[in-house]
Amino acid sequence: MGESVLDFDARLRTLSNAAILVTIGVLALVFLRPVIEPFIIAVFIFFLLAPGAHWLKDRGVPIFPAYALVVTAMAGIITLGGWWLYQDFSNFSETIPDHVERVQDLMADWEGRKILGVTITFVGLEDAVTGDAANALLLSIFGEIGSFVTLMFTVFIFLIFIILEAETLPKRLAAAYPAATNEKLAEMVQDIGKGVNKYVVVKTIVSLGTAFVTGVLLYATGVPGWFLWSALTFVMNYVPYIGSLFALLPPVVLAFLTLDPTTAIVLTAILVANQQLWGQFIENKMFGSSLDISPVVLLLVTAFWFWLWGITGMVLAVPMAVIAKIVLGNIEATRPISILLSERPPDVEEE
């Protein structure tokens, strides 16, 4: 009886401490976002660049020049892609009045029609589909692009310091902690590195493949803003389950506005098939195994991070969930929570 009470007290203390830490963590993420957000992005970019740097190192290039080469290559790709994206976005913005007029004509044509006894009406939507509303949306998007450029500059600064720290951190950990503690900590850090690195690299390859095919299809059929929508596909593909579907909406709508119905339907079917091929088949083959996180948990985590940091939070949601699950699984008191977050129970995994 006494042991049961002690166990209950210990678990209650653990839950209380966890609740306090989670509350402090959420408050920190909300109020310290300008500092924490670029740092986390820089960490994930580091995981993405590390394999390339170590590949160069294995071929005789010193580690810091190797990182300098991959960072320079990444900066060049981002700069070229940003310039191309700006040009495509500018060209697309010039065609927006025509698309707005086309939507207004369709609304006027379908107003009052009945389908299966339901009368179609667009009352209340007229003010949302106007040239002024489209211009306001464009201005907000340009403002977001400016904020993104500023954010990436901060990310670059953090990335430089993370690269400098990454090579000396293991030695400092070995000197700071006893052998047993250091071994367990090193194992946990290694698991986190492998899990996040695998996710970031594979997801980036899959996102690039999906975006490339999408861009080729849109360019070949003449859908305006093809590079803009392929870039949106690349970014949103990091959002689990729903991101790729949201990325399909703008090009599909434009396809039905600018192409004949048959071509638009065929293009939509091919775009959906392309996303399913990369997302369901190729990605699963490259991962080799699931992330072992419950789909419901992933959706909840994604919604939570969207509430915190918007689109950026949705992109970072899965890697953060992977890290949290690994950390919880390596701490005895929180291991049951890690099991609850899993997609499969441990006995099924072992089989």
Image (cartoon, rainbow, N blue to C red):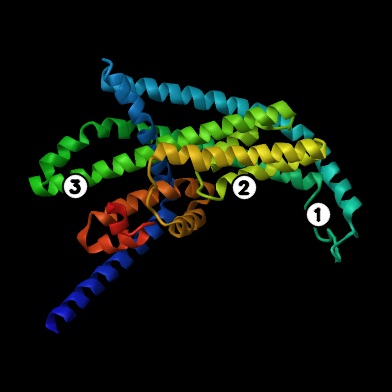
| Residue at numbered disc 1 | 127
Residue at (53, 31) in percent of width and height? 209
Identify which residue is drawn at 19% across, 43% down.
186
Q: Are discs 2 and 3 less than 8 Å apart at CB?
A: no
Is there any visible trace of residue 326 in the rendered image?
yes
In depth, the one of 176 and 203 nearer the eye is 203
The label on residue 185 is 3
For label 2, the residue is: 246
* Crowd around label 2: few <14 · some 14–19 · many ≥20 (10 Å): some
Secondary structure of the residue carrying tag 1 is loop
Question: Three-letter amino acid code at disc 2?
Answer: Phe
**Quadrant into which the N terminus falls:** bottom left
- Other residues around mark 3 within 10 Å, as few (<14) / some (14–19) / many (≥20): some
Q: Is residue 138 left or right of residue 107?
A: left
Q: Nearer the viewer, mark 1 or mark 2?
A: 2
In what element is the residue under mark 2?
helix
